[in-house]
Image: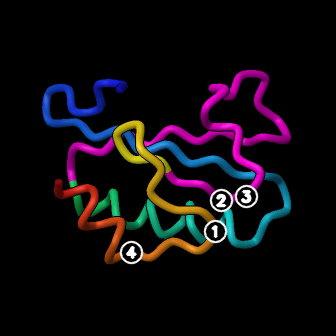
Amino acid sequence: MQQAKKENTVLVELVIRNDCVSCEQVRSQIEDFILNVPGINLRTYDLDNDFFVPKEKQSIITPAVWIAGSLCSLGILDMNNFRKKIEQ
């Protein structure tokens, strides 16, 4: 498993596509959350534009949210569940 917590930083990876309304909503939710919670590193992969997306992160369903190398959410993001997983 990928080391996610390094120096109290949690890696959150977001997989999105162009012209995906849900993707933009989830990105906005996560960015707003990060403003109030220090120690989160957000990495976004756009399946339509990025040349490199890690093989294990190439999701058919977008948006896809990964926390510390583990899949957290596909589609609409439940912020309560997201918060719980960040706090683990």
Residue situated furthest front in the rendering: 1
Q: Which residues are magenta?
A: 38-65
Give the numbered dot on residue 10. Answer: none
Left or right: 55 as drawn, with respect to 26:
right
Give the numbered dot on residue 61. Answer: 3
Query: To which residue does mark 4 refer?
Result: 79
Identify the secondary structure beneath mark 2: loop
Q: Position of residue 62 (x, y in %)?
A: 70, 58
Left or right: 87 as drawn, with respect to 47:
left
Identify the secondary structure beneath mark 1: loop
Residue shown at 24% from the left, 66% from the top:
84
Q: Is residue 57 above or below residue 55?
A: below
Residue shown at 70% from the left, 46% from the top:
59
- Whole-angstrom CA distance, mark 1 to mark 2, is 5 Å
Does the residue at mark 3 contact the one at mark 1 (Cβ under 8 Å)? yes
Give the numbered dot on residue 75. Answer: 1
Does the residue at mark 1 contact the one at mark 2 (Cβ under 8 Å)? yes
- Whole-angstrom CA distance, mark 3 to mark 4, is 18 Å
Q: Position of residue 39 (x, y in %)?
A: 22, 43
- Say which label, 1 or 2, has the lower sequence index: 2
Identify the secondary structure beneath mark 4: helix
- Say which label, 3 or 4, has the lower sequence index: 3
Q: Is residue 41 magenta?
A: yes
Q: How many marks?
A: 4
- Say which label, 3 or 1, has the lower sequence index: 3
Query: To which residue does mark 2 refer?
Result: 63
- Say which label, 2 or 4, has the lower sequence index: 2
Does the residue at mark 2 contact the one at mark 4 (Cβ under 8 Å)? no
